[in-house]
Image (cartoon, rainbow, N blue to C red):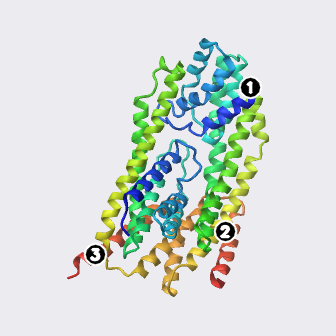
C-alpha cells in the first residue's frame, strides 16, 4: 500500500468524518467513508475483500475527530495486512475510548479555550480584529493540523502498536501547559473586562458581584446571564411601550 | 444601515459554512463566536461591531464543551446572525437585543442539530448496503449537504428575524446605553471568571490571580 497516497486520502477525508453523525453508528458511516480510498489501495481489484472490510468498518464507532486519522490509519494497516477481523474489531473498540478521552482533554478542555482566550485578550487590548481572529485560528489550528497528520502517519506505520506511540506522545504535557496558559489568560481577560466596565465604584461593585457569581456558578453562569439579560431587555422595551 | 440582498446572501453563505464547521466539516473553529460574529460584521462593512459581539459571545461560550454525545447549544450560526445584526444597527438597544437573541437562538440551532442527527439515524445505511462504497459515500455526502442547508436556512431565518426586530426595539427602547454597557461588561467579567473552573487543578488559581494582576496593571495604566 502506498503510504503517502494513503496518508493524503485519510487526512483529507478525515475533515468530514463527522458529516453523517447519527445516533445509531455515531461516526461509523464517516469512518467507512474515510477508509474507502485506502481500502481500494490495499485490496486492489479484490472487490470481495473490499466489501467485507467496508462492512466491518461502517458499524458503530466514535472518537475525537482530530484523532480519527490515527484510528483510520491503524485500521487500514490491519486490514491491508489481513489481520483477523475479530482482532481488528476488538482493537477498534479499545481505540474508541482512549482517543475520545485524549482528544477531549487536550482540545476541548484546554487547547481550544486557551486559544480563544488569546483572541479575547487581544480584542480587549484593542488589537485589530483580524489580528485577534488570526491569532486564535493560527494558534489553534497549528496543533489541530499537526495531530491529524501525525496521527494518520502513526496509525498507518504502526497498526496494532500505535497505542505505544500514543502513550509516548506528549499530549498530556501539552494539555497541562495549555491549561496553565488558559488560567493565566483567563485572569488577564477577566481583569481587562472589569477595568472596561464604565463608571465608578457602584459599577465596580457590580463587576465584582458578577465575578463572584462566575466563580461560584461555573458553567451554570450562562443560564444566569441569559436570565439577567432577558429581564433587562424586557425592562428596556416595556419602559418604551409604557411611555406616553 | 439597510441590509442589501448581496449582504444577506454573503452572510447566509458564511453562516452555512460556520454551521458545518461546528461538527461536519473541518472543525477549524470558524464556528467560534469570536470568528463567526466578527467575519459576519466584516461582510456587512463593520468588523468592529462584529468583533465586539464576537468577544461577548465568545466569553459566554467558553464553558460549553462538546464532550462525547452531549447536548449543547450551537453558537456558530447564532453568533453570525448577532454579529451581522449588530453591524447593521448601532441603534439604542441593539447590543442587548443581539446578545439575548444569540443566546436564545443558539438553543434552537442546537435542537436542529439533534433533529438532523435523528434524520441521519432514520436514513442510516442498512447492514446490506454498508459494504457498497458508492452507498457509503453517497449517504455520507448527502448528510453533509443537509447540514449545510440546515445552517444556511437557520442563518437566513435568524437574520430576517433580527433585521425586523432591531428597528422595532430601537423605536421603543428606554434604557440608557450606559446601563446596558455596564451590564454586558459585568456579564463578560462573570463569564470569564467562570472559566477558572475549566482549568482546575495544580497551581491554576495562582496563575489566574497572576493574570488578574497583570490585567489590572495593563487596564489601569492603558
Task: Please say if the residues under marks 1 and 2 sit with CB atoms less than 8 Å apart.
Answer: no
Mark 1 chain: A
Foreground residue among A237 and B167: B167
Classify residue A162 by image quadrant: top right
For label 2, the SS is: helix
Task: State the separation of the CA atoms marked 1 and 2.
Answer: 49 Å
Please say whether residue A55 is visible from this viewpoint.
Answer: yes
Give the quarter of the image for residue A44.
top right
Residue A129 screen position, x and y as percent: 58, 67
Asked if badge 3 and badge 1 are on a common chain, one would say no
The chain containing the residue under callout 3 comes to B
Same chain for mark 3 and mark 2? The answer is yes
CB atoms of marks 3 and 1 within 8 Å: no
Q: Name the mark on residue B208.
A: 2
Number of residues whose C-alpha sits closer than 10 Å to that of mark 1, classed few (under 14), some (14–19) or many (20 or more): few
Which mark's residue is nearer the viewer, 1 or 2? 1
Judging from the image, what secondary structure is the residue with disc 3 in?
helix
Q: Which residue is mark 1?
A: A2
Task: Classify A154 as above or below B110.
Answer: above
Real-space CA distance between mark 3 and mark 1, rounded to the nearest whole angstrom: 67 Å
Look at discs 3 and 1 and give the one toward the viewer: 1
Is A118 left or right of A156, judged from the image as shown?
Answer: left
The C terminus of chain B - image quarter: bottom right
Question: Where is mark 3, residue-wise?
Answer: B172
Label 3 packing within 10 angstroms: few (<14), some (14-19), many (20+): some
Q: Specify few, some or many for label 2: CA neighbours under 10 Å numbering under 14, 14-19, or 20 or more.
A: many
Residue closer to the observer: A8 or B122: A8
Residue drawn at (68%, 25%) of the image: A76
Place of residue B90 in the rendered image (x, y in percent of width and height, measured from the top left)? 41, 73
What element does badge 1 sit on?
loop
Residue drawn 45% across the image and 41% down it = B147
Amino acid at each position: 500500500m502506498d503510504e503517502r497516497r494513503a496518508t493524503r486520502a485519510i487526512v483529507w477525508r478525515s475533515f468530514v468524518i463527522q458529516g453523517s453523525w447519527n445516533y445509531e453508528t455515531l461516526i461509523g458511516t464517516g469512518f467507512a467513508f474515510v477508509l474507502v480510498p485506502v481500502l481500494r489501495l490495499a485490496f486492489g481489484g479484490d472487490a470481495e475483500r473490499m466489501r467485507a472490510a467496508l462492512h466491518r468498518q461502517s458499524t458503530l464507532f466514535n472518537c475525537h475527530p482530530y484523532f480519527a486519522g490515527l484510528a483510520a490509519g491503524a485500521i487500514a494497516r490491519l486490514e491491508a495486512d489481513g489481520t483477523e477481523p475479530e482482532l481488528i474489531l476488538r482493537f477498534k473498540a479499545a481505540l474508541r475510548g482512549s482517543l475520545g478521552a485524549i482528544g477531549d482533554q487536550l482540545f476541548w478542555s484546554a487547547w481550544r479555550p486557551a486559544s480563544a482566550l488569546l483572541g479575547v485578550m487581544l480584542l480587549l487590548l484593542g488589537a485589530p480584529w483580524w489580528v485577534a481572529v488570526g491569532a486564535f485560528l493560527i494558534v489553534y489550528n497549528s496543533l489541530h493540523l499537526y495531530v491529524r497528520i501525525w496521527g494518520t502517519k502513526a496509525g498507518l506505520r504502526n497498526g496494532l502498536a500505535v497505542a505505544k506511540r500514543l502513550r509516548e506522545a506528549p499530549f498530556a504535557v501539552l494539555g497541562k501547559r495549555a491549561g496553565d496558559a488558559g488560567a493565566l489568560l483567563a485572569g488577564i481577560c477577566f481583569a481587562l473586562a472589569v477595568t472596561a466596565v464604565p463608571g465608578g465604584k457602584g459599577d465596580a461593585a457590580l463587576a465584582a458581584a458578577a465575578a463572584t457569581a462566575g466563580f461560584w456558578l461555573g458553567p451554570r453562569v450562562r443560564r444566569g446571564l441569559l436570565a439577567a439579560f432577558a429581564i433587562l431587555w424586557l425592562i428596556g422595551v416595556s419602559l418604551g411601550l409604557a411611555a406616553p | 444601515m439597510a441590509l442589501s440582498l448581496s449582504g444577506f446572501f454573503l452572510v447566509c453563505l458564511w453562516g452555512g459554512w460556520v454551521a458545518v464547521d461546528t461538527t461536519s466539516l473541518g472543525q477549524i473553529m470558524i464556528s467560534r463566536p469570536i470568528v463567526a460574529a466578527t467575519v459576519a460584521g466584516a461582510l456587512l462593512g463593520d468588523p468592529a461591531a462584529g468583533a465586539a459581539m464576537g468577544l461577548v459571545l465568545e466569553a459566554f461560550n467558553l464553558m460549553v464543551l462538546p464532550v462525547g454525545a452531549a447536548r449543547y447549544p450551537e453558537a456558530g450560526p447564532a453568533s453570525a446572525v448577532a454579529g451581522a445584526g449588530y453591524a447593521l444597527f448601532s441603534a439604542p438597544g441593539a447590543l442587548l437585543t443581539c446578545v439575548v437573541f444569540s443566546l436564545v437562538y443558539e438553543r434552537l440551532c442546537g435542537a436542529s442539530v439533534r433533529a438532523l442527527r435523528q434524520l441521519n439515524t432514520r436514513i442510516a445505511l442498512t447492514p446490506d448496503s454498508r459494504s457498497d462504497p458508492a452507498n457509503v459515500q453517497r449517504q455520507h455526502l448527502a448528510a453533509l449537504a443537509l447540514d449545510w442547508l440546515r445552517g444556511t436556512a437557520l442563518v437566513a431565518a435568524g437574520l430576517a428575524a433580527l433585521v425586523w426586530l432591531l428597528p422595532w426595539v430601537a423605536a421603543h427602547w428606554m434604557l440608557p446605553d450606559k446601563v446596558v454597557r455596564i451590564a454586558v461588561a459585568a456579564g463578560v467579567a462573570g463569564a470569564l471568571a467562570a472559566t477558572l473552573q475549566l482549568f482546575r487543578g495544580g497551581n491554576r488559581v495562582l496563575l489566574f490571580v497572576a493574570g488578574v494582576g497583570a490585567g489590572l496593571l495593563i487596564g489601569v495604566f492603558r
